[in-house]
Amino acid sequence: MEAVLEARGLRKAYPARSGPVVAVDGVDLTLAPGEVLAFLGPNGAGKTTTIKMIAGLVLPDAGQVRIEGRDPHRDPAALARVGAVLEGNRNVYWRLTPLENLEYFGVLRGLSAATARRRGRRMLERFGLLEKARVLTQQLSRGMQQKLAIAVALVHRPRLLLLDEPTLGLDVEAAERVKALIRELAAEGQAILLTTHQLAVAEALSHRVAIIRKGRIVAEDRTQALLAQFSGEHYRIELAVEPDPERRRRLSALGARVEGARVVYAGEEEGLWRVLEVLRPLPLVRLERHRADLTEVFLRLVQEEADA
Ligand SMILES: Nc1ncnc2c1ncn2[C@@H]1O[C@H](COP(=O)(O)OP(=O)(O)O)[C@@H](O)[C@H]1O
Ligand SMILES: [Mg+2]
């Protein structure tokens, strides 16, 4: 499938008193239709700068961006293919109503006034904002404002949607609504590049994860593969009693580790049954397969890089 986004070797340094600060240092990213890529990293890692380069807002020092093969820094047609909700920025005008915002930004991105109005109404309906169509945007809740910002970013039907911290500052319910919306859009084929500090959000929504640290990508994989890689085959068996020395010896021969009343087994599933045979008939409290979450993966990767 043709990539919606291809970024290669992106680099950006900002001038500073003590010499240039390299914000992004050779970043490659690709995105296919319908794919959600979570772009994760600690504060100051270069996420927002990367997104701005992809959106055509910050000129890279080196490297290139292609959106459906077009360069947003040279070809205005590329800009019609991308929509962005930037972090912290005013993505919408607070003194306009939601409908006026959609009309304004729709026309700005090349729609006729009539088309912008028609699409704007449809988007408000879809995003559950129709009854707020004529209320000033500043009077909407933070969650509604964020949904409006996403609607505005989509009004010209871009192929690529960039969302920088889309659930930041939202209450739990509003964050859930925004998450559901992102999932729906992806299911319809929208390519979405998403940055977030909320790793549970990334884990719930993304097909792939790219982790950036100090301007460089330190890991990139399918979300499930990354989680599996860090989880390993790892079972924890909790017993009501500590196994006796004879059992401990047999467990250790099977490669299981005994810690008090807990047995940790990092082998294959078939071997697990041999471990359980040895334990029979000791009373079991719990048997679980350990699974890493994205927070664990993230912390380990960022830590590993720091140690290297
Ligand atoms: N406009 C700017 N001028 C100077 N330095 C900047 C500017 N924007 C970002 N930086 C610096 O670039 C680095 C990356 O920032 P940013 O892209 O905002 O990271 P993130 O979004 O991952 O937190 C940081 O060191 C930040 O201080
Ligand atoms: Mg940022």
Image (cartoon, rainbow, N blue to C red):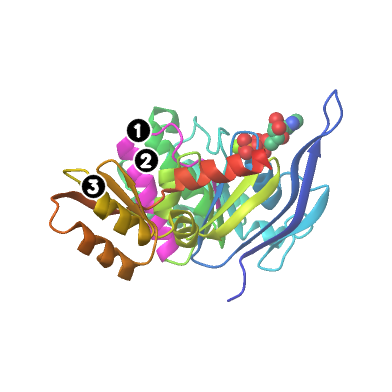
Find the magenta span and give its range: 162-187
- Residue 61 got which mark? none
Q: Which residue has dot 2 on it?
A: 175
Above-or-below relation of 46 to 250:
above
Q: Position of residue 115 (x, y in %)?
A: 50, 59
- Quadrant where the C terminus sits is top right
Would you say the residues marked 1 and 2 are in contact, meaning their CB atoms lie under 8 Å apart? yes
Above-or-below relation of 68 to 219:
below
Q: Is mark 3 within 8 Å of ligand 1?
A: no
Would you say the residues marked 3 and 1 are in contact, meaning their CB atoms lie under 8 Å apart? no
Q: Which residue has dot 3 on it?
A: 238
Real-space CA distance between mark 1 and mark 2, rounded to the nearest whole angstrom: 6 Å
Q: Position of residue 31 (x, y in %)?
A: 59, 63
Above-or-below relation of 282 to 21:
below
* Residue density around tag 3, few if under 14, some if 14–19, many if 20 or more, within 10 Å: many
What amino acid does circle 3 point to?
A: Glu
Residue pushed farthest top? 17
Instruction: Name the residue nearer the viewer: 158 or 204.
Output: 204
Real-space CA distance between mark 3 and mark 1, rounded to the nearest whole angstrom: 37 Å
Q: Is mark 1 within 8 Å of ligand 2?
A: no
Would you say the residues marked 3 and 2 are in contact, meaning their CB atoms lie under 8 Å apart? no
What amino acid does circle 2 point to?
A: Ala
Left or right side of 174 for 28: right
